[in-house]
Image (cartoon, grey):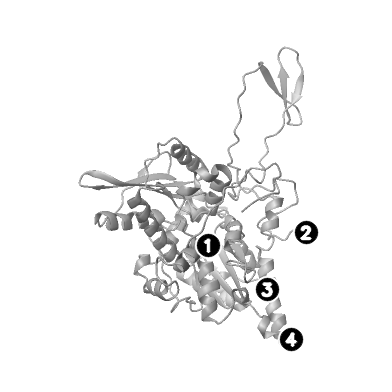
Amino acid sequence: MASHFSSALQLTDLDDFINPSQECVKPVKVERVVGKKGAIKIETDGSYMEVDEETGAEVKLEKAKITLNDCLACSGCITSAESVLITQQSQQEVYSILQQNQDCRKFGLHNEVKCVVVSVSPQARASLAAKYNLSALLTAQKLTAFFHKLGCDFVFDTSFSRDFSLVETQREFVTRYRSKSALPMLASACPGWICYAEKTHGAYILPYISTTKSPQQIMGSLVKDLFARKLDKTPDQIYHVSVMPCYDKKLEASREDFYNDLYKTRDVDCVLSTSEVDAMLETEGVNLSDINAADLDGLAGAGELVSHAGGGSGGYLEHVLRHAARELFGLQLNELTFKTLRNEDFKEVSVQHDGVVVLQFASAYGFRNIQNLVQKLKRGKCKYDFVEVMACPSGCLNGGGQLRPQDDESSKELIRRLGGIYASVATRLPEDNPAVETLYREWLGGRDGVKAAALLHTTYHAVNKTVNALNIKW
């Protein structure tokens, strides 16, 4: 079967498990049953045989199977069934839309030409900057020029939509803390973590997860609602592409929650990983370093490159902690001191007021740390008020869709370099962006209105286990 995916995904039509890009981290639970003693024998073909010590009878053991319903969407593998959801999530589909636009213009069908908008995440930008030895700003400017030359109309930075995501997460936490409900609040920006929570822990864990949309999906709301109105277009007249550091974002964009039934369009039509964008550069026969820089596009006002403090995964922990300390206790926090726990991907920080610990936050990256966190929560031993949760070890800069290290560089060295590039961009508090306050008032009709809730928040759905691996519910 011909693959609709890019070569980066290396898709083949197997029944279940397809081309791992990293070790599958799904834990397989084994039910222990008291029975007769036995032994395990390994055959020359690699199969395992259980040998009954009393009778000598041998029974071939079945392999542990990871079905689609077990999948955590950790980018460790891609399954055939998932390909049904994201067949159109490839650079081939982007090229197809751009070609359709050319054909429509050629034949005078200007009303059928789609406005193509590209939203680039800062993590993906940092990965490309590292490969081509460019600054973050130059990379953003050259990517803008590259996509414009392909035929795309606008190129935006998702740091703008992350302003809204951070502000909403801050406000949501303060509300929960004051009412002492659904704590700890767990960050919601990582789709791999959301997929794991919905499929593995269901209704128990979902109430703890922040309802705030990820920056990708808030950008979808901005592009298909605010920007569409600005251009006097309907949502289906805009084709929205996002460039992200992980493949899980393709699954997130495919969720029915982010589909407009009226106009039959998704908030994000296509998600490209960083490696897929790099493949597009190779297809076009250009080196990013050689492209002339272009002015940045701005979704609301002039284009600018601004980031957020708090690390390469969006800074949710730091922003929420500082806002909560100021809003709840009147405290202005200086430099935060983190305590490393089991490993570098599990850290905690606390805030004291009048000698009493009043806020305890943590970051948990990677599924091993997430599983430990969930188990503590289920046992009632989780002491935290907020946890920044990310599926990938080292966070979003190490996403499965990022460019891999060169031969002379280790993964850790690359992550450190990506962190430096990411941190080189000037930071700003999201509430200090004047466009955010303006849009809350003029676009959303206020912070607490129905429109703000609909466009900036979402819901989650426990996935019932079924025996059919093709029956996925997102």
Residue under numbered circle 4: 107
Q: Are marks 3 and 1 in contact (CB under 8 Å)?
A: no
The circle drawn on residue 402 is none
Cα–Cα span, label 3 and label 1: 22 Å
Measured in 3D between alpha carbons, the distance from the residue under mark 4 to the one under mark 1, in whole angstroms, is 36 Å
- Name the residue tied to disc 2: 2
Residue farthest to the top, as pictured: 54
Mark closer to the chain start, 3 or 2: 2
Residue name at image x 56 percent, y 65 percent? 243
Q: Residue furthest left?
A: 354
Q: Foreground mark, 2 or 1?
A: 2
Q: Residues within 10 Å of mark 4 (few under 14, many from 20)?
A: few
Task: Give the CA distance from mark 2 to mark 4.
Answer: 31 Å
The label on residue 124 is 1
- Mark 2 neighbour density, 10 Å: few (under 14) some (14–19) many (20 or more): few
Q: Is residue 48 visible?
A: yes
Q: Nearer the viewer, residue 250 or 426?
A: 250
Which percent across, then down, holds residue 372? 47, 38
Q: Residues within 10 Å of mark 3 (few under 14, many from 20)?
A: some
Q: Quadrant of the C terminus?
A: bottom right
